[in-house]
Amino acid sequence: MRRVGIFASEIFNDVLNPVTMKRILILGAGTAGTMMANKLRKVLDRDEWEITIVDKHRTHYYQPGFLFIPFGIYNKQDVVKPKADFIPPGVKMVFSEVDKVEAEESKVRLADGSVLLYDYLIIATGTETRPDQTPGLVDKLWRKEIFDFYTVDGAVELQKFFKQWEGGKLVLAITELPYKCPVAPIEFVCLADAYFTEKGIRDKVDITFVTPLAGAFTKPIATKMLSELLAEKNIKVVPDFYLEKVDNEKKAIVSYDEQEIPFDVLTIVPMNMGNSVIERSGLGDDMNYVPTDKHTLRSEKYENIFVLGDAANLPTSKAGSVAHFAAEILFENLMSAIEGRPLMAKFDGHANCYIETGFGKGALIDFNYDTEPLPGTFPLPGIGPFGLLKNTKINHYGKVMFRWMYWHILLRGKELPIDPLMTMAGKKMIK
Amino acid sequence: MAEKNYAGKTVEVSDEGYFVNPADWNEEIAKEMAAEVGIELTDKHLEVLKYLREQFETGEALTIRKVGKSGIVDIKGLYQLFPGGPLKISSKLAGIPKPTSCV
């Protein structure tokens, strides 16, 4: 159907090029997708570019806040807001499950069979916990004496459990790498130490941290600092434990080489995998993460697909800070691609993580693909105010303030006074 | 860095004993290294070591899970072949660098 009274030139143009609007489609309205929608809408001409974002869920979770729920520091209402509140005017929000991406034809099929076409696709479908992948995990003890804190429901159930618990053996176990927010399990055991101390029953609670890694963390200098911290807090670390299954009868976790660790309450970091739509679309690796150029953030296979946040197979942390830094690089490269220029911006894997250590203190790490977390000051060299790999009160305030920054600055695609690429300024080299 | 002698050949290894130059590796060397840690190398062991070397060549990050899905051996079997720290021990015996975690 044509409108009446249009110019002949417009009809002519339409015949030659039936699609006058170009389309950017974003899959996933989590931290990464929402930031991208905001950044792009500010810059791209509305008469030229249509931006659509698709997500099946209507609620946006402040995921860093889940950690605080089991200890009653936050409640559910502190970590939820409607997703639609963060999508800017001029971006079309579609609430639907995605059936699959048909990348060869540059289209996305939704669950109801409708089709969305795109010129550029940004995959920001994240990573999700898959407790179903570990035998015995989702069984009779699930959410009774076995809890996860990576979902709001798991965190809320654990809060109820801890309120009435009188002590025993608390085991935190990491199933497999990679998992979202690599420091969260360390924060969890530190906060548990503080929580039970304040409750006056710390002497009745035995805390064990179980990991498939060779130590408390991945890289040597941070591992040393964090191991000392855990030892100070009388938290046991069991390294090199590769979890095979949970024995519900014995109430124990069992490793592939048949070590057993008994528990009274188990907090599990379940296996993480990318969204199943990636698998259905044939776009993922064996963990459903999308093979992505680690510097340009473009799909290794398709020139008009970019990948942001946890959905990518980048060799860095799966964390909001990474998505935030990567968003600036992806934005530059997408602009280059649109304008037919080579992709010049190079992501360095920059991650920046606050580590809550309990009793009103926190530590901070800042690192990238090539540089492990080092001690120093951040973001201003020599000044701070934050101390890298130091346990201080000001770092804790950084984390507390971050929730406000997340909702008001970060998600809305506004600038933070932190460079997306990591800097060595303010870091101390140690051998 | 250090130097070690295996099967009549001098190889450069890291402080933790991992090969600096994966090209220095051969099966004889692997057998001697395995004997040092009390493992008698079978064909199955060698199959795993060769798989690891191939994966390393392609630049893929190695995980226990990936080896478990290789079709050569499952995770439990991998633990039986290389008790203790299967990926670390097998990487050392395969003459490739220490597997690193990227987070």
Image (tube, helix red, strand yellow):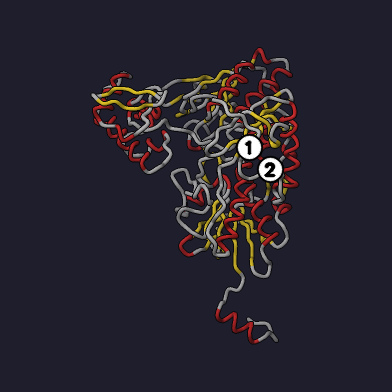
Mark linked to residue A352 = 1
Instruction: Indicate whether B19 appears above or below A404.
Output: above
Q: Which residue is mark 2?
A: A418
User: Helix or strand or loop: what does disc 2 sit on?
Assistant: loop
Residue at (52, 57) in percent of width and height: A305
Residue A267 locus on image (x, y percent): 59, 28
Residues at discs 1 and 2 both on one chain? yes
Instruction: Report the amino acid beneath label 2.
Output: Ile
Q: Are marks 1 and 2 in contact (CB under 8 Å)?
A: yes
Label 1 secondary element: strand
Q: Residues within 10 Å of mark 2 (few under 14, many from 20)?
A: few
Q: Residues within 10 Å of mark 1 (few under 14, many from 20)?
A: many
Horizontal relation, residue B31 to residue A291: left or right = left
Q: Nearer the viewer, residue B48 or A288?
A: B48
Left/right placement of residue B9 relative to residue A102 reads left
Q: Which mark is residue B60?
A: none
